[in-house]
Image (cartoon, rainbow, N blue to C red):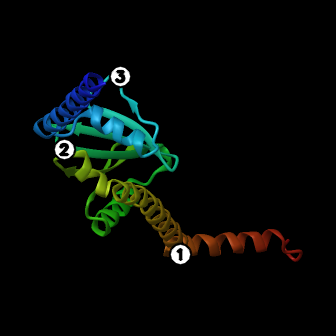
Amino acid sequence: MAFFRKKRQDKAAVGNAARENDARKDVKEGITVRAMFDFLKREGFVPEKDLNEESVIDFKYQGTPVRMEINDGEYIRLISGFSLKPEEMNYFNLLLAATNVMYELRMVKIVIGERWIQFTIETLVSSVEEYSVFFMRYLDILTNAITRHQEAYTKYEEERKSAEEHSEEAVIDKMFQEVVESQSNNPLKN
């Protein structure tokens, strides 16, 4: 009986030593894609590895697609964004809204391309445990930045349209149209 107890204790000691070795390895190597993948699963996400890029994990947060890039074992970037239809967008207002959001939420970077807009939060950390403390807050800030940008863009577009309607030329055009319409409906016209 003592023999079997000793064997179980030896197995437990080997298992503990292996876990400690893995933990030391993670500290040496920094954050690994595998460790972050496992962390996301434990947090209830459904992570997917990008088949084309080894250091990328994709997942969704409250319906929003998020990409996590892990570089050099300590640099993590959370990215979200969406595509744009250039013919429907006013790039000046997109940039103005992005500038305001980046001023309000200083840790968010916004990059606007011709057909896309990207929101990022970047951080340096030494372990998954350290990152886990701030992870949910980062996701909330990222999705908040997207919402704030959309609200600011809508506001600037409404202001631009209103200014165009109330410009001097627009007022004169409107008065001219009213005069023409009133004359076409005038029964005394002849």
Q: Point out residue 137 in the picture as x, y percentages from the top left corner.
A: 36, 59
Residue type marked 2: Tyr
Q: Is residue 28 left or right of residue 149?
A: left
Residue at image coords 84%, 71%: 185
Confirm whether residue 165 shows in the render: yes
Cα–Cα span, label 1 and label 2 = 50 Å
Q: Which disc number belongs to residue 51?
A: 3
Residue 95 in which image quadrant: bottom left
Q: Point out residue 76 in the picture as x, y percentages from the top left corner.
A: 24, 44
Viewer-nearest of labels 1 and 3?
Answer: 3
In the image, residue 90 above or below residue 50: below
Q: Pointer 1: what residue?
A: 166
Q: Quadrant of the C terminus?
A: bottom right
In the image, residue 41 above or below residue 150: above
Q: Is residue 189 left or right of residue 156?
A: right
Q: Pointer 2: what residue?
A: 75
